[in-house]
Amino acid sequence: MRIFPPGFTAEKNRDDGAAPTWFLKITAGGADYYLGEDSFDIQNFSGGISVLGWVRSWGKITEVLSGGLNELQVADFDLDVLVDPDAAPNIEDLATGFDLEESPVSLYAWFHGLDAATDPPQEILRGYVRDVSLPEDGMARLYIEDETVRLERHIGRRVSRLEFPEADPDDVGKMVPIVFGSVDRLPALAVEAGIQTSLPSNLDAVAIAFAVSDATGIDAGEVYQVDEEEIRIDQVAGDLVTVTRGYNATAAASHTKGAILWQKKDRFVYLVADHPVDSIGKVLGRVGDAELDISAICSIYTGQPGSELAGYAGRAVVTIPGYITAAQAVDLLAVDTIGVSDTISVSDTIGVNDSISVSSGSHDHAAGLQITTVHPDSVIPNNSSNYGFTGDDEQDMLDGNLTHTNALGSAGRHQDIKLAQAASFSGTPTRVRLCCHARNSDLVLNFHRNGVYQGSLTHNNASSSPATYKSGWMPLPAWSDLYASNTRIFLQLNGNSYIFQIWLEVEFDPSTSSSGAIVAKSGAATKSGSATKAGSATKSGGVYLSGNSTANTLVGDEILVSVSRNLAAPGAVIAELLSTYCGVAAFQQIGALPASYRFDGALTKYRRAIEWLNELAFQSRSYFRMRLGEGRLIVRPTAPAPVKAIGAVVATSRRGRALSREKAPLEEVVNRIALFYARDWSLDGSDEGNYREVAEGIDAASVGKYGERERPSLWRFDFVLSPEMAEDLVLSYLSLLAGRPWRFDFEVYLEHLELEFSDQISLDFLAGQVVEISEAGISPGSESRADVVRFVARG
């Protein structure tokens, strides 16, 4: 409901006195023009203005509904303007000399005699010139639409080759996600995936010069992978490449037409969101139908200050190192119909005489396996801070006596713990595991041997009591592998932790060690006898293979991430979309939503802003409207709360009331709802099968009256994750849509000008019927016609 100044309110409520006046502000060529039916001046308003009497007639301001139950709301009107031949410029000059669509227009109401300093003209509608025409000599017609027309712009940014020349072709054209709340398994977009091309024909295992489908971007010195083989590009001439086959110790092989050549890179970059996020959790690589957790090898950048990848400031990004593949999957069935007839007989009369004797001295042979411990030698952080470690601490850790009582580091700190060369151990090692004695721990220990990740120990425990944690066993081929130059323990702290001791446990076989052993052998072995073979063997039949062979699949070809952003309240989400993508800074939520209402999802489709804003409003049981430069989220009430009573309507010339009543169309009744929610973001599209949950409800009384009536396409709610919210939405919409309320269409005078769309009112001329205004139109009057407000209400 609009709020007017006291003097203006008193004038609009009067039955007599000064007539209201209307004027339109329009901007052309940087100058403001005020158009009305009469010429007059208004002091103390915008520095003093002069209204030009060019308007011949005002059209009706009408709110137009479209789009079904989750309708878009737009108001428009038109007016005829006379061409004043004595004015320079006149409306024809403005219409033909400038693009009137560039600047907003505003419609004002005022009353003569008011002091504009205390009771200024009131802006009733703001919009833009949608069209302008000169239908006849001496007149122009302006078509005005409210500011919703400027929300026709599309939200988001799409991946393009211009911005990302190495983007995966499958991701070119896709929109970079806009994330809010928590989203699980959201596909990230490969924007640095290397150059890709294919073989236009079969390639044997020896050819070093061959054509590719497209050599654009391929340069000499680069390495490409095709199936299991790596090749190095030596020369490029058009689409013909000369290469070194079997590069990096891979085997040269034959490849079939259509095989993909993918550039090997030190890293692949995946764009998660077009803005900073608060956290990125698990990262999964999809291989066929399987999803592999590759979080441990990824570098994560939230886009927040201090966590940004160079070249991607303010964007959430994940990188993976190099070219990661899953082993080739082969499914071959061998059918063998060979028949074998073998009549060979064997006679063996060999006799063996073995008189060997063995004598042994002392032999060190312990039964079973044993475990020993290996301690890190030093702690080397990855920046200038040593987090409280000293040389003595390092020695304590080496000796197994480190009892550090200060937190090793704050959230997100890392350090490498290297191993010292120790005295030789006896026996042969079999496996190794990570061990840690700590409290209040939120840490990750990763073991890298010879530069290759082996396994990790992850622990999150808020207990203040120290405890010992151990990882699973990892293979250890040799003792020397513990002390290679690039073998280390990588420690990452996600919160403050007290680390008392870190060590390795190695399981080894002591039986391979011996000392002072004396072994002597004596005796003899003799063989005698004979062996004979007789008979024949025959084979018949054939062998054939059936099945399929699936070539290697890039783990990095599709990356899914769990991402979270502290922006989930429906009003906050809509406010940010308006300010960031639509240039609308002002926002207001009218009405309260239940505490369970929040949005968890992402915008991943390139759509008009008004469509997204309306969809988000519908999924939070609200309307979205623009009013005077302000975006509004208007919560649909579930209980009547009238803001004003209307006692009478305008009378017609036939002494009746300007009132029509009709029931809402049967087509709008919805009495059964299956609301699909908790979308699986790893799947594309909004089919019902892409949601993990469904909330259902039915209004039995409505079904008894009208039969079952559903609108399935309305209830796929991508941004709802909470079961409480889904259940409340079902109940609320059933209460709003299961019946056939009356629709009332009537006119009133300007004393009700403050009422607007979605206001609830009481119709006292109909025994206090409570209705909600669905349309609020205005007909500016003239000397021969009164100013009226037209309402269409439902209740």
Image (cartoon, rainbow, N blue to C red):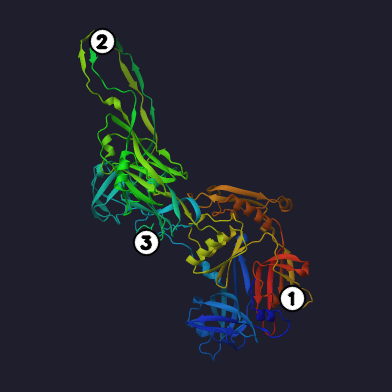
Measured in 3D between alpha carbons, the distance from the residue under mark 2 to the one under mark 3, in whole angstroms, is 80 Å
| Label 1 environment density (alpha carbons within 10 Å; few <14, some 14–19, many ≥20) | some
**Relative to 781, is 642 above or below?**
above
Count the marks: how many? 3
Badge 2 vs badge 3, beta-carbon distance below 8 Å: no
Badge 1 vs badge 3, beta-carbon distance below 8 Å: no
Dot 2 falls on a residue whose secondary structure is strand
Front-most of 16 and 84?
16
Nearer mark to the viewer, of 2 and 1:
1
Residue type, mark 1 in image: Val
| Residue in view at x 61 percent, y 49 percent | 695
Nearer mark to the viewer, of 2 and 3:
3
Where residue 653 sits in the image (x, y, percent)? Answer: 77, 78
**Relative to 540, is 202 above or below?**
below
Q: Which residue is mark 2?
A: 531
Where residue 596 sits in the image (x, y, percent)? Answer: 59, 54
Measured in 3D between alpha carbons, the distance from the residue under mark 2 to the one under mark 1, in whole angstroms, is 125 Å
Ranked by sequence position, the earlier of labels 1 and 3 is 3
Q: Which residue is mark 3?
A: 163
Residue type, mark 2 in image: Ala
What is the residue that sits farthest to the bottom in this orientation? 86
Q: Which mark is residue 676?
A: none
Residue type, mark 3 in image: Glu
Q: Which residue is mark 1?
A: 650
Front-most of 244 and 389?
389
Front-most of 42 and 508?
508
Is residue 571 rendered to the left or right of residue 709? Answer: left
